[in-house]
Each structure stands twice: as structure tokens, then as C-alpha cells.
Image (cartoon, rainbow, N blue to C red):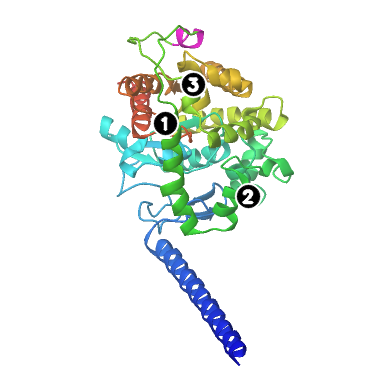
Amino acid sequence: MALFQQSANSKLKMRKTLANIALLAAVTILCLALAEAGLRAFTPFPIHAKKANKIYDRDFGYRLNPGHPTIDKNGFRNRGEKKAVVAVIGDSHTYGSNVRPEQSWPEQFEKMTGVSTYNFGVGSYASYAYYAVARHAISQNYKYIIIALVLHNDFKISGNSCDIDYASSAFWRQAKSKLSLHLPECKLEYNWRTARAPSFIRWFRGRANSALLSAIDYLVVTPLSNEWYQLKSRKPAKKPAGNPATAAAPARARAPVAKRPASAYFGARTLLNQEIEYSFTDLTRRAVRNGIEDFEKMLVDLKYIAAEKGAKVGLLFIPSKVQIIYEYADDKDIYEQVPMLRNMALNHKIIEDRLRAFMTKNDIYWSSTGAEIIAAIDETERKGEWTYPPNGGHPYPRGYRAYGKAAMKFYERMSGQ
């Protein structure tokens, strides 16, 4: 009898334990569901999902969702009505990824110049979208159109360049016929590779489409990761020993600066991304060469269409982090450890030099943010601060300010001031 009672008590205890576990699981699931719903209702998360905060556009691929509090009725990151004077076109570096709207370079440029500036930047936009958006800006009577070209991913045959519906777009059918464009072949499997993060992060951001996971990654994982790599890099700085790439840059007053090794600027995720992204500007690939050739044709077309309306078009180079750190760093340790990075930096420079020569030959305005970014790195190094996070390619606000300063000088040249 005692044994039977003991067995009954044991079963009752087990049932209570299982009931408690089930209750805990149910409460946990309910809390997670409420957190997910709350984030979606009151915040911009999920911001990493495949089409999060984007709406379809036949000619551009997509615009941003006007329902987002920082996005205007046209689907771009602007506040209030703006006069059609300067239009800036670009990707996440122009949109202002990881900074507040007022810290994006178009808004900083507007404050510096006092000239009404409309931000047409959207994350992942690339060369084909730039052309379509620039044509739109010209049709809207903007007087100065500045295209901010980010060399390391604006010629990739994936992402936004493959979100555009070329076949059903009358704009693109006409452009292809008029300019003899190649246009991307997006059905090939390799075109859909993404370098935004490791595969499990892509699953969370894209397939899972979770606002909660997106918030954890954006607000916790990424900041802690960057802080970890910054702590690792706090070693005695080395005196500059001279560097041909820096010496070849335009002359400017530069006080001696003790610099971190180049490896300090590259965290694990960044290194992984760069290895994948090398293919985006690999000149041995016909798709890359075709994309650059198409862009050159589109630039010339923009020049003449703008001139017909009394407008001007210019190209502002935003060099990749790989290229900037290569030209800046006296200690190129990371480029010796990972030769692909050195090759990538040099490859970006080859493409930039080609486009510079092309635009000079065709009397198209161009400039670069390179000198201003290097000056910003000099300044922040003196203070022991950072211009770029180790685990990302977008700069901190001071880097965007450097973009704005370069754009201001460029605008003054374009406008004859």
C-alpha cells in the first residue's frame, strides 16, 4: 500500500512538473509573441528582413515604405517638403545606415550649404537603380544630381539590380534599346548570393523575418561585437613608417599620427563579408565588366538629358572601407594575412581610375570622399576614437560628416561657386 501511495505521489509530482513546464512554455511563447507584435507596431523592426520596410517599384526595384516614421510620401528618407535643387542618389551610405536622419550626409550637406537637398538614397540600391532614379530626378527639375557610387557593391549582379523588373518596365525596355545595354542576367544561381551576414544570420533576418531577432541583432549583438574587436585592438600604437599609397594621394597637411594596425578595422563578420563580396568587383567576371560598361553608357545619357533641362550630373566616389584602410594604414598586416583584401583594394582602385578617366574624357563632373575620410580617420585616431566600426562597412556619424564635406566641395565646383 505504501509503495502504491509512493508511486501515485511520484506520478502526481511529475504531472505538476510537466504542467509547470507547459505553463512556463506557454507564458514564454505569449511574451515572445507580444514582444514581436509590439516591436512591429511601434518600431521599425524587422529592418533586416528580405523586403522589410520596402515597397515594390517597377523601375527602381523598390522604394521605402512611406508608413515608416522617417520616410516621406515618395518612399525616401526626407523630412518635410523640399525645393527641387540638389538630388543625391545612392545606397545605404547615402541613406545613412546606422545613423539618425540628421546625421546622414545629405542632411549634413544641406546644413553646410543651405541648399535644399533631397535624399534619394536607399539601402542596396546599385548602378541600374541610380540611372532610373537620376532620370526621375531630372524629370522633376532638380538642377544638380549627385550620384554617390560605392565601388564595392554597386556593380554586383544581385540584390537590387535583380529586383528590377526589366522585362515589364517600359522605361527599361526603352533604355536597353536606346543605349544597347547588357542588363543583368539574374536567373543564374550565383547572382543571388548575399554577403550581408553568415548563413544563420541571413536565416534569422530573411526567412524568419522576426522583429525580435532583428532587434537583438541590431541593438545587442552588433554593438557588443564591435566593442569586443575595439577592446582587442587597444595595443601600443606604431609610428608611421611611410606608405606609397598614402604618398601618392593628393598633397595635404597631415601631422604625424600613431596608427592602429590595419587588422583593427576588420572584425570576423567583416572579413567573411569581404571574401564573398570580392566577386562583386572581380574584373575577370564578364557580368562585372558588362555592368561597368552599362554604367558608363548610362552616365553619358544622363549628362545629355540633364543638359537639355539646364541641369548637371556628377559622380561622387565613396571608396570602400577595404580601399580606404589600405591607402591609410602604414601597417598593412591584415592585407598580408588575407591577400584577397589587398587584391580587392587594388581592384577597387582600378575600377575607380577607369571611371575617372572615362568621365574626364566625356566632361562629366566627378570627385571623391577619400581625402575627407582619411582626414577624419587621422582626427579620430588622435583622440583614440573610430571612424568605422570593426564589424561593419558603414562609418560612424563623423564619417558621414566627411562625406558631406566632400559633397559640399563638389557642389561648389559643379555650381561654379
Q: Is mark 1 on a helix, strand or loop?
A: helix
> Is residue 245 part of the magenta span, yes or no?
yes
Question: In whole angstroms, how far apart are the C-alphas of marks 2 and 3?
Answer: 41 Å
Q: Nearer the viewer, residue 43 or 235?
A: 235
Q: What residue type is labelled 3?
A: Ala
Residue that label 2 marks: 165
Q: In which quarter of the image is the N terminus?
A: bottom right
- Left or right of 384, for residue 341: right
Residue that label 3 marks: 262
Q: What element carries label 2?
A: loop
Q: What element carries label 3?
A: helix
The structure residue drawn at horizontal position 70% and vertical position 33%, both measured from the top left corner, is 287
Q: Position of residue 297 (x, y in %)?
A: 60, 29
Question: Residue most toward the bottom?
Answer: 1
The structure residue drawn at horizontal position 36% and vertical position 19%, both measured from the top left corner, is 378
Question: Residue most toward the right?
Answer: 188
Residue 370 visible within the image: yes
Q: Is residue 17 above or below residue 328?
A: below
Q: Where is residue 43 in the image (x, y as percent from the top left)?
A: 38, 58
- Left or right of 75, for residue 346: right
- Left or right of 345, for residue 246: left
Residue that label 1 marks: 230
Q: What residue type is labelled 2?
A: Asp
Q: Nearer the viewer, residue 328 or 91?
A: 328
Q: In this view, does 373 lie above or below 280?
A: above
| Residue contact at pointers 2 and 3, CB within 8 angstroms | no
Residues shaded magenta: 244-249
Looking at the image, tell me whether mark 2 or mark 3 is earlier in sequence order.
2
